[in-house]
Amino acid sequence: MTVAPSAPQPDTSLVRLLAGWLPRQRWFGGKDGPIHDLTIGTATELLHGDPSLHHLVLDVRQDDTTDHYQLLLGARRDLPEHLAPVAIGRLESPGLDITGYVYDAAHDAELTRPLLGLMADERTVGPLTFRRAPGTGIRTDLDAAPIPGEQSNTSLIFGDAYICKLFRRLSPGVSPDLEVNLALSRRGCEHVPNVHGWIELQPGALGTANGSAPDASAGGTDSGGDEPVTLALLSEFLRTATDGWQLALTSVRDWFAQPAPPGPPEPPSAPTTRDAGAAGGDFAAEAERLGAATAEVHRDLAAAFGVTQAPPELLREIVFAMHEQLDQVSAAVPQLRPYAPAIREVFDRVAAEAAPLPFQRVHGDYHLGQVLRTDSGWTLLDFEGEPARTPAERRAPAHPLRDVAGMLRSFEYAARFLLAREGDLPPEASDELELRAQAWAEWNRAAFCAGYAAAGGPDPAAHATLVRAFEFDKAVYEIRYEARNRPSWLPVPLRSLARLAG
Ligand SMILES: Nc1ncnc2c1ncn2[C@@H]1O[C@H](COP(=O)(O)OP(=O)(O)O)[C@@H](O)[C@H]1O
Ligand SMILES: O=P(O)(O)O[C@H]1O[C@H](CO)[C@@H](O[C@H]2O[C@H](CO)[C@@H](O)[C@H](O)[C@H]2O)[C@H](O)[C@H]1O
């Protein structure tokens, strides 16, 4: 690592500690290559004393790209044992008025509790502004713990009342998650959690505060350069919720555990909601309700952000981008290549369509892990779009069936997830389970589509080629995502692609 000469370097040892620590974090997006420069873009002291709390934006250059990461840095003279696992190191010399042990303060309830007060009082500290959502109150007496598990961001649960998502890699402008949640809440949409507050960084502070040249990721060529940058989002915590992925996997497990009928396995018959219940796949009624909730959210998104008629040229550009992604992923993942001709043929059929299509704001990265089932129904989360897309792409209007295709892929994932990890099963058991997986996916996909169309969404069956193209595009994206992030999961999208393209 080298240190950018133009950047203020108040404490080289802090920068060096951070450069060693950052690549080990789950949420660090640049694991593919080395860090060339790491500088502290902004440093804001939020709490003075021992312990002290500092908000840092780290500007991380890798090749020609500069990414910005947010860190709540805690500092203490002595580090208690419970914070040892999140230690970043011990500063040999003080800098930025920070001394002693430094650590990831997201894990220190003593330091995260005051964030609630700052939002409740709508305070401004340096370039940071803490906001309370209009018409809401914020309790300030709650301790937080980060949610366990691997995440792209870090979410803190305050008591049983709030969940606060701290965005790790920062994008320019207002986060689509905040923007969409506020717009939907204003319309009384019951399928999103209430927003209570948020934290933002003043416009222009990303990538320019340290004198480095503005870059694409900091808003130079992208949307959002004049807007505040969303740093965190405080929402109602839905304590009775279970996420759709867990519910679906439980249903698949039950279905796989049913005794096998004697004789060779039967191919699945035409799906109905009742079949799925009989099959132990008790999820179909939920899938249908989820389809309806999705259509209702799409309707509210259309009302809040408007609908445009996308001309055929735009559709051709989109198809061009689908081909490009397929080229790139096929080059990197050879197992995808045998399916490419079938995929390209479907893409080209969509490009040949002549009629304009209604485009609107959509979820953008819709899957079973983004929906929660509460006592009262389905709630949709995380309107950030796909993490690998640019901020402008994530906010761009799209056809709503793109979300439908995302969820259809997720049913495939859930059906095949257990199977892809059962490599040592005897071949007969594998065949039987493969048919069961296929049946589960078909029942639930059909139920979801039926619920979506019945609640007023465009009927997926009437746009079969478009849905298939979106599904293929998502599958290609997933193959790249898994190859990069979870190689042991790669067989999941590959196996389902074999069926989809077969
Ligand atoms: N309002 C909420 N109530 C309860 N749990 C939530 C809520 N929002 C998020 N979660 C939980 O936190 C997880 C991560 O949230 P998400 O917004 O998808 O973050 P990330 O961008 O890090 O993936 C979700 O899968 C869900 O289990
Ligand atoms: O939730 P994120 O915004 O971080 O989305 C990314 O990660 C997802 C995995 O956590 C990934 O989703 C894929 O795996 C899911 C099961 O874990 C499955 O339900 C989805 O259908 C599948 O796409 C998502 O693609 C990625 O953008």
Image (cartoon, helix red, strand yellow):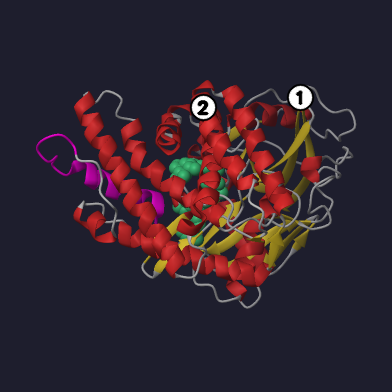
Disc 1 is placed on an element classified as: loop
Coordinates of residue 272 in the picture (x, y in percent): 28, 58
* Disc 2 residue: CB within 8 Å of ligand 2: no
- Which quarter of the rendering shows the C terminus? top left
Asked whether 156 or 225 is in front, the reply is: 225
* Residue holding disc 2: 336
Q: Over which residues does the magenta segment extend? A: 238-265
Q: Residue at x 52, y 40 (%)?
A: 472
Give the total number of marks visible in the rendering. 2
Q: Residue at x 50, y 46 (%)?
A: 468
Nearer to us: label 2 or label 1: 2
- Which quarter of the rendering shows the N terminus? top right
251 in magenta: yes
Mark 2 in CB contact with mark 1 (< 8 angstroms): no
Coordinates of residue 446 in the picture (x, y in percent): 37, 55
Which mark is drawn over residue 36? 1
